Amino acid sequence: MKKFLLIVLIGLSVTLFGQTTDRPWLIGISSNYADFNAVEMSVRRQLRDANWMGKTLPSQLKVARSLSKSFVFGAEFSFVTLESEKLNLIPTIKSNVSTDKFWRMGGQFEYKFANGYLLKEDAIFDPYIFLGLNGSNISEKTYLAQSTGAGTNIWFNKWLGLNFEGSYDYLFDFNDYFHYSFGVTFRLGKAKDSDGDGVPDHLDECPDVPGLKILNGCPDRDGDGIPDHLDECPDVPGLAEFKGCPDRDGDGIPDHLDECPDVPGLAQFKGCPDRDGDGVPDHLDECPDVPGLAEFKGCPDRDGDGIPDHLDECPDVPGLARFKGCPDRDGDGIPDHLDECPDEFGTITNKGCPEIIQEVEKIDFHAKHILFEISSSKIKQESFSDLDEIIAIMKKFPDSRFTIHGHTDNTGSDALNMNLSKNRAKSVKDYFISKGINASRLESDGFGKNKPIDVNDTPEGRANNRRVEIKVIK
């Protein structure tokens, strides 16, 4: 164990010695005491029967130097007046003590807790632990000793403090002893200032670049009060709220993020204005003075049909894009203003009026009997006869076109229902094509749960909503 501690001390001296910190030197003057008797006692007896030997006047000098924020190397010289009569009465004393003079000189490595990690560097309470070697001279013989201990400084200001220290000294060829010291300590040395700006490095946030005291030693090239390392525009005077960047138009968006830096605007439009308040900035708004919609580049759509007014032939009535904004109430592909039967599904050849009324009813009847496997687009075998009846009608009217629409109830997710309705409609379409119906006559689509024909809160209503509808469009 002693050899191991010796190796540790040598290693520390090689790896740490030579490092420096601000105000690196420390000088201490103390009274010190040795107690050979307590080492032989139990802890309880040590507290009761301790026998300190020493002078009350200053009898120890300590010189130490900081190696880093955490480590200090110190050298000590101390003198203790022993009471040789009492010392020789210790049963385990290894040799007779013939003098009252006890000299002690050595060095120690200290680990500071006030290192900025465990405690603040400028903490008033500055504890440390240490490991050292010393030579202890007793009766004109010098014994090598290894010291292990702890101490603390209590600072009154940057330079002056009290020191308290205690150690257990293990002598290789003589009795061990406890060593204590109490005194004053002084910190000396000038604070390091690498960049020469008058701000010491330990307070300088930019220790390698000359700066201003008011900015903790950091420079401010543009003089706007924001230090360069925090200034996103260090060469242009700016505002603290924008990290040192300017805002020429005063709209709250700094110029480097403002797409319209000379015109007050809104943050949501990167500093650009929106005169009509429609959410489309003026430079992207084709109708900047009339509130409109973003999807139409800021132009209005009064009837809300998705066709902007300037392209809508029926701007006040919701309609369809393929009819230039005009409606087709019956969905027969003929816009209402050209449809002689706008509320009845018809054909173009019949000017929008229906044909084959009886056959349409038959198609509706058979369509209600089209069934699928559960959660699948596979048509059940028993539905083929109904599908074949519909095919017969389609072949009877070869100029007619048909839509196949799939619908679901509200059970399951919207995405699942939408996909299922589309796939089921396509399965019916594919079956018709496989039976000789030209694909150009058929359109399929699905609407999920979006077009119910009944309520969805009863089994019967949900059953009605799960359906395939086949309509004649021509």
Image (cartoon, rainbow, N blue to C red):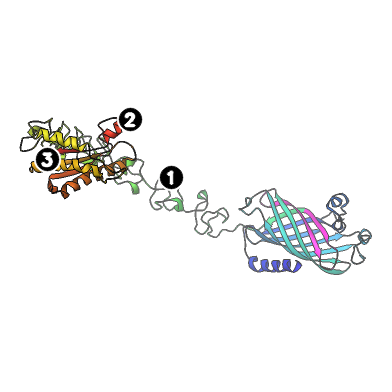
Question: What's the magenta region?
Answer: 156-182
Query: Horizontally, is 55 left or right of 150 in the view?
Result: right
Label 2 neighbourhood size at 10 Å, few (<14), some (14-19), many (20+)?
A: few
Q: Position of residue 410 (x, y in %)?
A: 32, 36
Point out the image quarter for the C terminus.
top left
Q: CA distance from mark 3 to mark 2?
A: 34 Å
Which residue does the image show at 33% across and 41% down from the upper left? Answer: 268
Task: Classify residue 294 by image quadrant.
Answer: top left
Numbered disc in front, either 3 or 2: 3
Which of the pair 158/132 is nearer the observer? 132
Which residue does the image show at 34% across and 49% down from the upper left? Answer: 256
Amino acid of disc 1: Ala
The reply to whether residue 306 is visible in this rendering is: no
Task: Classify residue 458 by image quadrant.
Answer: top left
Residue 35 vs 252, above or below: the answer is below
Query: Horizontally, is 195 left or right of 103 in the view?
Result: left
Point out the image quarter for the N terminus.
bottom right
Magenta highlight on residue 160: yes
Given contact means CB atoms under 8 Å apart, are the residues at marks 1 and 2 in contact? no
The reply to whether residue 91 is visible in this rendering is: yes
Magenta highlight on residue 62: no
Amino acid of disc 2: Thr
Q: Determine which of the numbered discs, if any, sits on residue 393 in the image.
A: 3
Name the residue that disc number 2 marks.
Answer: 458
Q: CA distance from mark 1 to mark 3?
A: 79 Å
Name the residue that disc number 1 marks.
Answer: 240
Task: Classify residue 142 by image quadrant.
Answer: bottom right
